[in-house]
Image (tube, grey):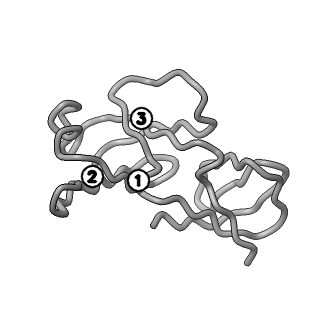
Amino acid sequence: MNLLQGEGAGTEVTLVGGGTVITADPVAGDVYVAIQPHSVSLHRAQPEGSPRNVWSGRVRGVDLLGDRVRIHVDGAVPIVAEVTAGAVGDLGLHDGVDVWATVKATDVSVYAL
């Protein structure tokens, strides 16, 4: 689980340490933002489309978990993605590779502190 702390105003959460997350519903005050790793999509080029959250970063860790792979991404919004082994090969994911992470606003859960 990606659990990030920040302050909500409208549909935007400004994270502690920098970066922002867009939510589907308005939020206010101190909150935790929760994002499931399987809700994070990774791309090698800046993506276009409907996801409201698009962040650049660099792979800093790859963990094999059976038929799934957890990819740790450092950036303005540090995040963990869960992808298939096939996606790792297709995208050439390994430590040090630059990537783009996307998350739909509807896949972001928010909890008041």
Give the residue pinned by disc 3. Answer: 100
Disc 3 to disc 1, C-alpha distance: 15 Å
Residue type, label 2: Arg
Secondary-structure class at tag 1? helix
Q: Which image quadrant for residue 89?
A: top left
Disc 2 to disc 1, C-alpha distance: 18 Å
Dividing the image into 4 quarters, which one contains the C terminus? bottom right
Check if mark 3's residue and mark 1's residue have beta carbons within 8 Å: no
Disc 3 to disc 2, C-alpha distance: 13 Å
Relative placement, left or right, of 58 versus 52 is left
Q: Which residue is rendered at x = 47% and y = 24% of the image?
A: 47
Q: Which residue is rendered at x = 52% and y = 21% of the image?
A: 48
Tag 1 or tag 2, which sits nearer the N-term?
A: 1
Secondary-structure class at tag 2? strand
Which one is in front, 10 or 82? 82
Q: Which mark is residue 60?
A: 2
Tag 1 or tag 3, which sits nearer the N-term?
A: 1
Residue type, label 1: His
Which one is in front, 72 or 49? 49
Q: Tag 3: Cα neighbours inside 10 Å, few (<14), some, or many (≥20)?
A: many
Give the residue pinned by disc 1. Answer: 38
Q: Does residue 4 sit above or below 75 in this rendering?
A: below
Relative placement, left or right, of 60 versus 19 is left
Which is more foreground, mark 3 or mark 2?
A: 3
In the rendering, at what x and y percent does residue 94 appear? 18, 43
